[in-house]
Image (cartoon, rainbow, N blue to C red):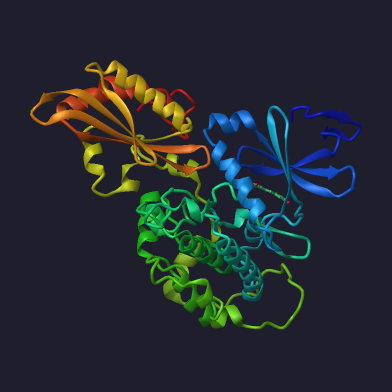
Amino acid sequence: MEAVEGEKKGGVVLQGRYEIGRVLGRGNFGRVHVARDLRTGKSVAMKVVTKEKVVRAGMVEQIMREIGVMKRVSHPNIVELHEVMATRTKIYLALELVRGGELFGRIVRLGRVREDVARHYFRQLISAVDFCHSRGVYHRDLKPENLLLDEAGNLKVVDFGLSALADHARADGLLHTLCGTPGYTAPEVLRDKGYDGAKADLWSCGVILYVLLAGSLPFADDNIVTMYRKVQRGDYRCPTWLSTDARRLIPRLLDPNPSTRITVPQLVETPWFTKTSISKPISIEPPAADPAPAPACAAQEEGEKDEPETLNAFHLISLSEGFDLSPLFEGDSANGRREGGMLFATREPASGVISRLEAAAARGGGGMRVTKSGARGVRLEGSESRGTKGRLAVAADIFSVAPSVLVVDVKKDGGDTLEYRSFCSEQLRPALQDIVWAATDPPGTAAV
Ligand code: PIT
């Protein structure tokens, strides 16, 4: 870590106040350290964000939003933001220190948890999520890695880096940014036609509940396209060993139709949620030996249990074929791309993508104009009409699929197909070549 303000015998000291200690984990844009407040002797979790990284990734707004959101939500099941400090090069978030690790680690260690233990965590999760929603905050990246446990076994939600505020909704009242983690993301978010942040968060809660009880993801497949299809159809199987109440609740959460999906007021009235268990401290014992699963399900459950998979942007890119991610985004928009356009992932910030598109437009001859189009796109338009089909126009939509990972979708938006194809091969592809991200290739070796 960069020397922050001074050195003390124990380590680096920030602004004479916090002694920075060991690394707890990695958050967006930097590490999270244990730090000790030298005035009070109390420990905090210090998230250290490198300003340059945030600026380079074009994510100043995102980090400012995270700070704004965390200040707005104070709840026993949400990691508290104590204070924000900054030096010339870094931003420091002093967060409540939670020492029990990630809920995810517990599931990985135990395979799954007993229903009463799952109920305890799930109630706390819903309490935090409902509180956020009542404050107009939608987390949008709920998953077990973002759920920490304190020493008393209480759950604490963390990482509001992708959260949205209700006032970010468009005129239709819906959110439009594609974000979250594949596997936990609601089908309507993947469809990218606008979504209700509260409904989408509840879907993720449904996936978390399934993972807690089953020890595997409900929608898992080696092929990401097949997985996305399963999500869209709500195609999963409930393990037979779950209680009837759990087997009734899960489909109401994992309902692919957000308008019929269960709401929080309905959820908290369900028999599974309200069930009182004999009060005893939360134990992390593995569940009792299972009754033999019904034969029809046995093969599937076995396979899933071995590999609780978490898909991330890396998987998404590495599973894509030939840098063409188009199967993930099927629909009529694919037509323009088939004519020679492209769909690729990049770690370049949006500003870098746009400047390359501008360079390609400038080299394209005929004085192509670049204009902003919609919330997340640009349009390149020729000034003269060459064929019978009018001016060549190219639309490039840029959207975020994970922190620091963008997907760029380039399509013909007007004009002659042959002219478009030659513009793509001669100008666009060479201009974009070095920023296309392929998870398996060393940087710079990828070709569009
Ligand atoms: C811990 C313990 C703790 C806080 C954290 C981790 C924080 C993690 C974190 C925070 C973020 C973020 C990503 C991760 O974006 O008390 O092990 O704001």
Nearer-the-camera pick, 89 or 48: 89
Q: In this view, does 180 lie above or below 393?
A: below
Residue 240 visible at all: no
How many discs mark residues in the rendered view? 0
Q: Which residue is drawn at 37% across and 56% down?
A: 172
Whether residue 254 sits left or right of residue 150 in the image: it is left
Residue 350: x %, y % from top left: 45, 32
Whether residue 195 sits left or right of residue 151 in the image: it is left
Instruction: Give the quadrant of the C terminus.
Output: top left
Q: Residue at x 28, y 24 (%)?
A: 369
Residue 27: x %, y % from top left: 64, 43
Q: In which quarter of the image is residue 136?
A: bottom right
Residue 193: x %, y % from top left: 35, 53
Residue 38 visible at all: yes
Nearer-the-camera pick, 354 or 214: 354
Q: In which quarter of the image is residue 196?
A: bottom left
Q: Which residue is drawn at 55% across and 39% down?
A: 61
Instruction: Give the quadrant of the N terminus.
Output: top right
Q: Residue furthest left?
A: 388
Q: In this view, does 321 lie above or below 184?
A: above
Q: Is residue 183 above or below residue 47?
A: below
Residue 412: x %, y % from top left: 23, 34
Nearer-the-camera pick, 34 or 305: 34
